[in-house]
Amino acid sequence: MPRPYVAPVRLRLLLVVVGALALDAGPGHGLDPVGPTGGSPAPRGHLQSSGRAQQPLEPGADPLAVALGANGWSVRDLAMRIDLDPPDRWRRSIVNRCLSDPTRMEPEIAALASRILGAVERPGEALRLCSELADLSAPDSAPGPVALRGAVARFLGVEPSAMSAPQLLDLGRLEALPPAAGAWLARLLAAHAAAREATAAVVRRIPAPRIDLLDRVVHNPARESPEEVEQALSIASAVDLRALVGAATALATVIQHRPAGLDRLVGRVRTVRLEGRHGTFVLGGPGDDLHPERAVLVVDCGGNDRYEYPRLAPPVERFGQVRVLIDLGGDDLYRSASAPLAGGFGSVGIVWDDAGDDAYDGPPGSLGAGVLGVGLLVDLSGNDVYRVSRVGQGCGVLGVGLLLDGAGHDAYQARLAAQGYAGVGGVGLLVDRAGHDTYYATAGQKDFRGDLFDSFAQGCGLGWRNRACGGVAGLIDGSGNDAYSGEYWAQGVGYWYGLGFLVDLGGRDRYVAGRYAQGAGVHLAAGLLVDRDGHDNYVATAVCQGTGYDRGVGVLHDLEGNDVRVAHDLSQGCGFANGFGLLRDDHGCDVSIAWELDSQGYGTEARSAPSIGVHLDLGGIDRYVPEGRNNTVLIRGQGGILLDAPGR
């Protein structure tokens, strides 16, 4: 299990201060007492600030426009110059929109979150949304009615007349099923065969040595050499991802339209195993089953089942495997040493689990991970545990990765590049609709600064700087009291034309991270953290909590609740090196603490152009350290505004 995040010494001192302030804030405040009281930290440096009283905003007034106007700016001044860099085939249009008009970012992502939360039980639709984010016009090729005999032969890779006696015997068992079940199985077998054929076209294009290189580059983010990056991009350029996305969408659409009561329709049938040269199809009954690795298409009708693949396989064997596991009930175990689980490595991989308290333990490239492919994991109910070391849990690199969880109190454990991560050419989303959930992404790999660790998780879109633009990544949580733990690069962060977002729609939540976190856009990128309700706590170190760094856009927006925010520097509404940062809090009695003065509405000039930082609080009795007052607007630095308005 990954170790918990341990805050640096200064941050721990700040937590002591927060404890004292929260104790004084009265009942119902967002922070539980964390220790003995202590004195406020003395901020370093000096910053010229001028302040005046702030009256309640006029009805219908745009709070951001009012804050910007206090320093002579308008919303038009927030646009980033994306035309300064050459065109890149990997740059996504949604990133261009967020940078060109930062005010569009939150409404567009809020609409996306609403649509995809409504599609948890319709993953075909969710994959189409991912296609839109990737600027792909993937074909919608779900098969219509097909003959069962022909579908079985296509899955087996033989002519109908060439089926063996055992295969014909199992075909007879399938033909004896109720018509609705038989028709659905025929469509499923045909869709699986189509995905395998689309995958074969990818495999033929890539020789074994390049598969090894792709595996090495993708599973070690931020550690690639320039030569390896160029080779990986060359590999990806030779592959049409649309065919794989279309095949995955077709499979998901077939699964979601399975007949009602499928477990009752086929549950009394003796187990069917169709052995073909490409793998085995298993139709399992309601008992407790152990499904072998050779089973590439499974429909299991119940029981506490095990999907265990202990064999270690080299990348060339894992590349191009199409595996679809459908389990209709029971407390199940999914565990693999190297074969992807719900992972598409040059292929399509799907796991669909209807119900039960399940455990998932996958190797890199699993649990909703697409690496030059598509990975989809759907778990509709139950208290589940998801474990992967890296590259998983809603992760896309040169592909699409999607994890959808419907309900239950779930635990997500990872180390690196997970829980909503997207690298170049990728879309990675983790969507959890309901439940009190925990998200851990810690101790992944050491950052170049020393004894610190990168997470690249919980809504992190990462590019290869000066070579290829980043992907689109998000973590969306519908409700529940949730805990998010990360280190560097986590919780709504984008890097080099990447977009990362974290949206939490309700509950009392805790966010802990290191640098580059909690709504940070770094080096021409966009990051967003939105929390809609609940008394929440935010702890991070720097370049966080609504910071735009080097022509980046970073936003943290908390709509309700009595909240506590702690950071060190470059935080809480900070624009640096021509970036735009915004921290907006709509309601509640809040505590905001930053160690350094370059926070809480701070911006300076760089390269003869402005940097704009806005800290915007629209109601409640609030506390600020080091400075800031209720019902006051402060002009801080050359482009910073802290506006605390009386409630409306």
Image (spheres, rainbow, N blue to C red):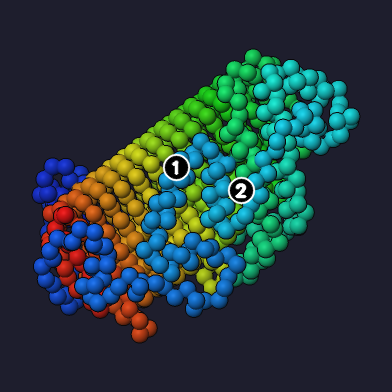
Question: In the rendered image, which quarter is residue 446 located in?
Answer: bottom left
Element under disc 1: helix
How many C-alpha atoms fall within 10 Å of the one at disc 1: few (<14), some, or many (≥20)?
Answer: many
Residue type at tag 2: Val
Q: Earlier in the sequence, mark 1 or mark 2?
A: 1
Which of the pair 62/273 is nearer the observer? 62
Residue 311, position as x, y percentages in the image:
66, 39
Local SS, label 2:
strand
Q: Position of residue 462 (x, y in %)?
A: 49, 61
Q: Quadrant of the N terminus?
A: top left
Question: Is residue 46 shown left or right of residue 409?
Answer: left
Q: Quadrant of residue 492?
A: bottom left
Q: Residue at x 46, y 45 (%)?
A: 115
In whole angstroms, how far apart are the C-alphas of marks 1 and 2? Answer: 19 Å
Q: Amino acid at mark 1?
A: Leu
Image coordinates of residue 246 in percent, x first then y, are 65, 47
Give the residue at x 63% y 35%.
254
Asked which quadrant contains residue 302, the reply is: top right
Instruction: Name the residue: 50% across, 27% down.
Output: 355
Residue 605 spot, x, y in % from top left: 31, 80
> Nearest the camera: 135 or 21?
135
Does the rendering let one see residue 455? Answer: no
**Which mark is nearer the camera, 1 or 2?**
1
Residue lying at 30% horizontally and 64% vertically, measured from the top left:
582
Q: Which residue is mark 2?
A: 374
Q: Is residue 583 left or right of residue 620?
A: right
Q: Is residue 88 visible from the viewing direction of this image?
A: yes
Q: Which residue is mark 1?
A: 117
Which quadrant holds the C terminus?
Answer: bottom left
